[in-house]
Amino acid sequence: MTRPRLLNSIMRKWAIMRADNRLTVIVMAAVVGLCSGLAAVALGRALHFAAATLADVHHYWWGVALPAVGASLSAIFLNFLLREQAGHGVPEVVYAVSKQGGRLRFRTSFSRLISSFLTIGSGGSAGPEAPVVISGAALGSNIARWLRLKERQRVILVGCGAAGAIAAIFNAPLTGLVFTVEVILGEWRAFNIIPIAISAVAGTELSRLLRGDELVFQHQQFRLHPVDIAASFGVVVLATIVSVLLGRLLNGMARFAHGTPLPRWLRPAVGGGAVGLIGIYWPVVLGEGYGYIQQMIQGAFDQGLGLAALLMVGKVLATSLTIGWGGSGGIFAPCLMIGSLLGVFYFRLLTWVVPAAALAGEGCFALLGIAGLISGLLQAPLTAIFLVVEITGGHDVILPLIVVSTLTSTFCFYIEPGSYYLRELIEKGQYLRPGTDARVLSDLTVAELVESGYRCVPADMLLRDFVSILEHSRSYLFPVHEPGTSRYKGMIFVDRIRPYLFDRQMHSVLFVDQLMETEVPTVTAGDELADVLNLMERENLSALPVVENERFVGMLSKAVLLDHYRKELIVQTSA
Amino acid sequence: MALNLKEVAERLNMPVETVQRWVRQGKIPMYQNRGDYYIRHEMLTRWAEEHQLKVTIPNSSAGQTVQQTMGEGILPAMRRGGFLYHLAGDSKEILFKSAVDLTPNLESAERQQVYEKLLEREHLASTGIGHGIAIPHPRSHPGIGLRLPQITTCFLEHPVPFEAIDHKPVSVLMILLSDSTKQHLSLLSKLSFYLRDRSFRDFLLGAPPAKTLLETVARMEAQAK
């Protein structure tokens, strides 16, 4: 008797286990993390090689053309060979997560790696992080597709790809995790944290294994005093200014480039050429600049105060020229570079003004600058904090770090709400975080909510006949259609025609189409519910007719919407 | 400009109680000043934008012009439409033809159109509302260039069969023309309201002179108000 019961319960548990694909997701998370790590190492190696080979070329006058050719080639590769949308990567991943259920094309998993290699390798000022993030995310998405996982799990694997990429590049698993949750997914939940953490660790381990000691950022220790905390407020001010400036410049360049009559593949050449010109004088601004960032963190950066300021401006210009004009690459590495230049500049300025100030060191301020830029431009203060903590490998800098990150992101939020990554998505209304109103409204469709069963009355019906219909009806809304063709003509609101209903003389005089409202806006099945609700609010109506191909389909009412909305919210927000 | 709770509630189209709760829960950044809560207008706009809420600016002057013509009674419309006495004819067609030809404020090209529309309406159902009175009108209004609605009162030479609901021949036509359905309906229902009064109907059937008729209508409208 006990045996079968035990067997039964095991069978039941087995059925539950088979139906739940948590384990699959966890295993696949590790795979995706490894793939992302591989992509990160590959792109890093390739860029390293390109930088070493081309280092001398940038000194020749014709070296100017190199970033132009590279950027143009990358645009041709992306737009014509692979027919992909240009873009820096992270917004596309966020868009895929919030609007497409995590769907990304397979070719995306390598296209950005190659195009960003062409742009950055030839000297364009952009970062390799976003291309690796989108590649990892696309791999995750496609693995989910092959395993027939549902949207929810697919989104997690997309996040795993992003986490693995960032973790592998910076040798910082926690940063990968935090970046993914803060920027890509926007949702802290147990079921997505675990796979993402696994992926981040897998990516980091792979990159450690393959690259060994040539890691981009080596650990660094600092000793801090209260003076440093006071001084960090200056970093906040500078970082806010530079973040806003860089953001505006990037958008302005993109808008300007879009307005020029040049073909799309030629535009990046203009920006690239200009970057090349800057690069003749200051080769520091070229490429992703990891080497220089490393130098600055170690305090081994040998340029003077004025040059640091000039380089910072140059890097800002070069970055907006490269990315704004359509080069392929991310904004993360330029943020690090500009941030560290900002920190160095600020440190030198302070020690020049107050030579006696016992500050922690140039490297520490370079890190604070990095944190400032990431939390300002990308609105990702937690990523900034974790990145710096993991780079320094200790908690010594955490206090000024928190000051800089939180204050800069808050100030930047006052000036420009929304991060650089998400601004465009927010403007288009495509930025949907789980459990928000916009998310729920965009998931529900008009077709799910439409109520049929309304009786249509022909336009040439006399009021007398309409009143007799009304006697046996519970509805107070009647759509009117054209007799013969059944084309929708208008709505009758019984509550609005009362004076005529009770005037018997009018019964034989008025026709239904004289009583109907023709100015009621109609809705089609494809309309966005947020727009429909706005329409209802503006017209002060609680229901709108749904009309498809000039035929009345049904009514969409606020009452039904609220009912569905609530259930949808419950389903979406409960884990 | 600083707004208080009530003004914020008005602009957000929410009850004051809700806004109060939001303030208490710290959802809307309003500051306290001498016991009252305020928020600057710019801040409210930004806050609403962040939360995808609409801020409306309260106004009181909307929809006044429509109300004016809607509010006016049948007297000005009757005055504009004029009066036709001793209209001769034995059928709807002849009566409408001669009435439309004599109706004021119509372009000559429009007359044919109005005539056709009146007949078309009559074919659908008679406009005879009984007791010897009919209110012919077109069912739809496009093509009629009238800026203001008008009622032309026609007294027939002799009663004419009109297929009215009580099968009585008709001896008074009140032709109602306008260019919008809203005005049309409003006038029609007002006219119908006055015609329910038996003494007014009898008075009309006696083909009173225009001046006395207008005086009577003016008196009735004053009473109705």
Image (spheres, coloured by chain):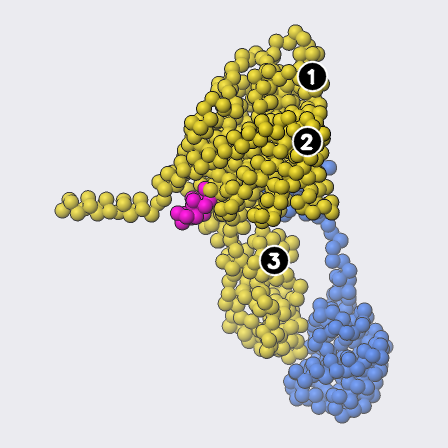
The kind of residue on which mark 3 rests is Leu
Residue A541, numbered label = 3
- Disc 3 vs disc 2: which is toward the camera? 2
Comes first in the chain, label 3 or label 1: 1
Query: Where's residue B106, x and y in %?
Result: 83, 76
User: What residue type is disc 2 on?
Assistant: Gly
The Cα–Cα distance between marks 3 and 2, rounded to whole angstroms, is 66 Å
Q: Residue furthest top?
A: A356
Q: Which residues are magenta?
A: A140-154
Q: Give the number of callouts.
A: 3
Label 1 lies in what chain? Answer: A
Give the label, 2 or 1, closer to the camera: 2
Identify the secondary structure beneath mark 3: loop
Q: Position of residue A71 (x, y in %)?
A: 64, 38
**Could you tell which of marks 3 and 2 lies nearer the N-terminus?**
2
Q: What is the secondary structure assignment of the residue under circle 1? A: helix
Q: Is residue A186 left or right of residue A280?
A: left
- Residue at point 71% right, 18% down? A306
- The residue tagged 2 is A63
Dot label at residue A305: 1
- The chain to which mark 3 is attached is A
Colour that chain B carries in the picture? blue
Q: Quadrant of the C terminus of chain A?
A: top left
Q: Alpha-carbon neighbours of circle 1 within 10 Å: few (<14), some, or many (≥20)?
A: some
Q: Which mark is residue A64?
A: none
Above or below B211: residue A202 = above
Q: Which chain is painted in yellow?
A: A
Which residue is more in the foreground, A394 or B123? A394
- Callout 3–callout 2 Cβ contact below 8 Å: no
Tell me which corner region of the image, top left, top right, bottom left or bottom right, holds residue B41: top right
Image location of residue A7, percent across then percent down:
20, 45
Q: Label the magenta part by its dominant secondary structure.
A: helix
